[in-house]
Image: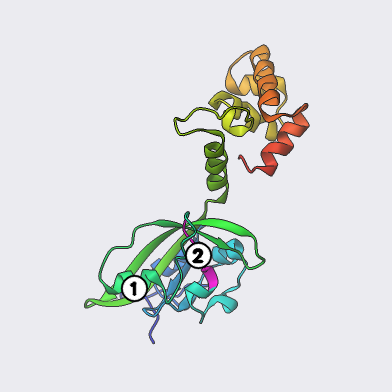
Amino acid sequence: MDTNIRVSSMPVRGTGALGTLEGPFAIVLDRTGDGAFVTDPSGVIVDWNTAAERLLGYTAREAKGRSCCQILDGYDAFGNRLCYAGCQVSTTLKRQEPVRAFEMRTRAKGGRPLWLSVSVLATAANGTPGLTIHLMRDVTATKERLTLVHERLDGNGRARNGTNGAGDLTRRELEVLRLLTEGLNTRGAAERLSVSRATVRNHVQNIFAKLGVHSRLEAVAYATRQRLF
């Protein structure tokens, strides 16, 4: 099967994990910061870039030749399996229907859970499905942060009784906490936010109370553990 994408009369071969593709488009994919892989019409991976290796832990040699469902084995937010009985993206494309960006819960090679935001770009020749490019971005921290906030709020968007945590922090308190994780002291945080040191100290005390911690070190440890930033 010819897996080359030619986007000019004089194709230029990529030099990285996407080296089997040709053309400037291949070079762009190889250099992108997002994970990218390419599948043939049957859903088999034919190329896998270095960012995908870093993201999921599989080398190009391990990924290529396998079904994307074998690598990703993804689920949606409700626990419904997205990868079963063949690639759902391939099935949708065969129906000549557009594939919108979606999020999936999966695991890296070592078992680390993560959420991916996936965008799809399909190619075709004379109406026949061709290669499909998948772009992946790690959105785990964002998903976990939203889950934490939702757990702290009731159906009306108010804090649940008897709960403390990041979901109770105001936007400014979150900003102060983020600055603490960056190592800024009271003076540095005050200068960054253009407020007085007393205001920063008040925010810090509120953060301590809401997170149930007693020091800046504990607050930073909490933020790191919960991946708030």
Residue drawn at x 54%, y 43% as measured from the top left = 147
- Residue 195 drawn above or below residue 143: above
In the image, residue 74 lies at what x, y percent? 50, 64
In the image, residue 97 lies at what x, y percent? 26, 66
Q: Is residue 137 magenta?
A: no
Which residue corresponds to mark 2? 74
Left or right relative to 114: residue 95: left
Disc 1 secondary structure class: helix
Q: Main secondary structure of the magenta part?
A: loop
Left or right relative to 160: residue 95: left
Residue drawn at x 26%, y 72% as measured from the top left = 95
Instruction: Please provide the residue range marked out in magenta.
Output: 71-76
In the image, residue 167 lies at what x, y percent? 57, 32
Q: Amino acid at mark 1?
A: Thr
| Quarter residue 185 falls in | top right
Left or right relative to 119: residue 159: right
- Residue 47 drawn above or below residue 223: below
